[in-house]
Image (cartoon, helix red, strand yellow):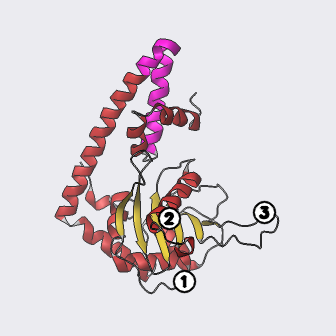
């Protein structure tokens, strides 16, 4: 049974719902980027981008844009080694979605991909890690391709960000209201908790996720048994169960589902988690 009163802003469902509120999303972006943003489009939750039938499609937690910049904000609760390349892929598909046939490359808008992590992705105690493309021989020279990737760490300890951003990250980490923005977010969280339609939707999504996880677990165990004929049934089943657990812990259920039908992806995941 879901205890709705304990669902916080750090819950993916809640985060996505709160961030679809345009003004709150705009203020959060201003807080993260440390600059004024006059206006943004209505935030799109779970925006789907699929370049072709054969290519891997994606769903962005929160997508919005202004006149010259595309923004993608992701909440990442589970540690995952694929974040750097995932951010690269997200950014590349955002570009494909932005540029139409026959348009000049100069018409590409800036893109900023933001991962709000409830863990330290680089284990250096920083609150923020910002990446841009620069010249290796002279790091003062920027490529000026308009791309930025930001990884935020809610558990940072260094004095490396302005106080408003630290308070925002602390709120995500522990739910403590300390300023006007965190109060507005918290008020939205409390308001959304009471929404019967939202509760029903979350219960449906939660039940569906559990059912799919069980189905995929059965599929993976069956696949493990098949591989066990050649490599040892017990070893293959254990390896499969470990991978399932790691993917579920990292909230990577989309990859869990896809890998059951994609041997190459399955092999890559085994390699990624050191299970080969």
Answer few, some or many: residues within 10 Å of disc 2's Cα (few below 14, many 20 plus, some between 14 and 19): some
Which residues are drawn in magenta?
A: 224-249
Instruction: Specify the quadrant of the image occupied by residue 153.
Output: bottom right
Q: Name the residue under label 1.
A: 35
Q: Residue at x 33, y 75 (%)?
A: 21
Among all residues in the image, which is located at the extreme right?
137
Q: Position of residue 61 (x, y in %)?
A: 40, 61
In terms of secondary structure, what is the magenta stretch mainly? Answer: helix
114 sits to left or right of 9: right
- Contact check, label 3 and label 1, Cβ < 8 Å: no
* Label 2: which secondary element: helix
* Label 3: which secondary element: loop
Answer few, some or many: residues within 10 Å of disc 1's Cα (few below 14, many 20 plus, some between 14 and 19): few
Q: Mark 2 points at which residue?
A: 95
- Judging depth in this view, the residue of 271 and 197 nearest the camera is 271
Q: Name the residue under label 3.
A: 136
Query: Which badge, 3 or 1, is on the more N-terminal residue?
Result: 1
Residue 20 within the segment the image draws in magenta: no
Query: Which badge, 3 or 2, is on the more N-terminal residue?
Result: 2
Among all residues in the image, which is located at the extreme front?
102
57 sits to left or right of 188: right
Q: Position of residue 143 (x, y in %)?
A: 69, 70
């Amino acid at each position: 049974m879901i205890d709705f009163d304990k669902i916080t802003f750090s819950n993916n469902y809640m985060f996505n719902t709160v961030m679809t509120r345009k003004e709150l999303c705009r203020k959060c972006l201003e807080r993260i980027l440390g600059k004024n943003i006059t206006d943004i489009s209505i935030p799109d939750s779970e925006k789907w981008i699929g370049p072709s039938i054969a290519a891997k499609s994606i769903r962005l937690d929160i997508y919005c844009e202004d006149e010259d910049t595309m923004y993608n904000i992701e909440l990442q609760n589970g540690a995952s080694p694929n974040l750097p390349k995932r951010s690269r892929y997200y950014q590349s598909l955002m570009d494909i979605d932005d540029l139409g046939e026959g348009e000049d490359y100069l018409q590409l808008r800036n893109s900023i991909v933001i991962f709000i992590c409830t863990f330290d992705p680089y284990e250096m105690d920083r609150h923020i890690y910002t990446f841009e493309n620069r010249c290796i021989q002279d790091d003062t020279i920027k490529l000026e391709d308009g791309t930025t990737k930001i990884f935020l760490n809610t558990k940072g300890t260094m004095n490396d960000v302005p106080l408003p951003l630290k308070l925002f990250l602390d709120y995500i980490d522990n739910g403590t209201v300390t300023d006007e923005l965190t109060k507005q977010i918290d008020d939205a969280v409390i308001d959304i908790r009471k929404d019967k339609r939202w509760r029903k939707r979350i219960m449906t999504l939660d039940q569906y996720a559990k059912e799919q996880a069980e189905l995929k677990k059965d599929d993976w165990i069956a696949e493990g048994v098949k591989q066990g004929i050649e490599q040892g049934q017990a070893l293959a089943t254990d390896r499969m169960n470990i991978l399932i657990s790691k993917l579920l812990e990292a909230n990577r259920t989309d990859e869990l589902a896809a890998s059951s039908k994609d041997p190459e992806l399955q092999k890559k995941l085994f390699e990624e988690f050191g299970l080969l």
